[in-house]
Amino acid sequence: MNPRSKLFLLSVLLVIAGCSATIDEYQGTEPKLQLEQFFSGQLEAYGIVQDRSGKVLRRFRADIVGKWEENRGVLDENFVFADGEMQHRCWRLAKEGSHYSGVAADVLGKATGEVKGHALNWRYTLQVPIGEKVWDIQLNDWMYLVDEENLINRASMSKFGIDVGEITLFIRKTGDVAMRDLTQGCGI
């Protein structure tokens, strides 16, 4: 390998290494994120889906209701996209120390992650309908607690290890769970 090729390879490796944050970097940061506190009650979210070039493909709003009992939680998410499409997702969550796991109907296997300080990083595979097919998209999902009422969520999406896009959401607490009848959806 010639010196120029070695330099190029080293540069690529440094860029890749420099782009990978780890959850340990957030140890000790405040305010501390506790999913069972933030995701309790009513929340609203606003977000966008972008392709890998940054072009906004979709815009959406979501109403979320969360309820926790001890170390088990349920998130009832109702999405309304700018084009009128509606989607529903019901997360069933579990906490074990600083680690969280979750399952949902359109998630393959189990989402797993860890909280340190004000951040959560979790990973999962989401089944996304694209035309007549369903794609398995890997999500590297990061949540950052801004304050007790607000959280920013960024998730990079990849398929076969290739970046295909990003989802960005702003999530805000709006009230207590007792303010909404939850007989439908997740049944919480």
Image (cartoon, helix red, strand yellow):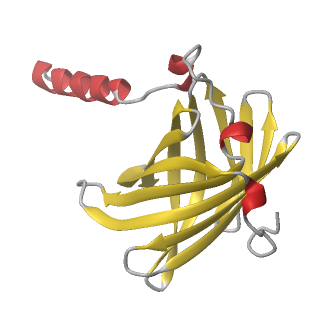
At 50% from the left and 18% from the top, the residue drawn is 25
Observer able to see residue 18: yes
Depth check: 92 or 6 in front? 92
At 34% from the left and 24% from the top, the residue drawn is 18
Depth check: 144 or 40 in front? 40
Q: Where is residue 84 in the image (x, y as percent from the top left)?
A: 43, 81
> Left or right of 102: which side holds 2?
left
Position of 61 relative to 161 (above/below): below
Depth check: 177 or 91 in front? 177
Position of 27 relative to 90 (above/below): above
> Left or right of 95: which side holds 175?
left
Quadrant for the N terminus in the image: top left
Indicate the quadrant where residue 82 lies. Answer: bottom left
> Left or right of 83: which side holds 79?
right
Q: Position of residue 117 (x, y in %)?
A: 59, 22
Quadrant for the C terminus in the image: bottom right
Observer able to see residue 142: no
Q: Where is residue 78 in the image (x, y as percent from the top left)?
A: 60, 69
Position of 25 relative to 8 (above/below): above
Outermost left residue: 4
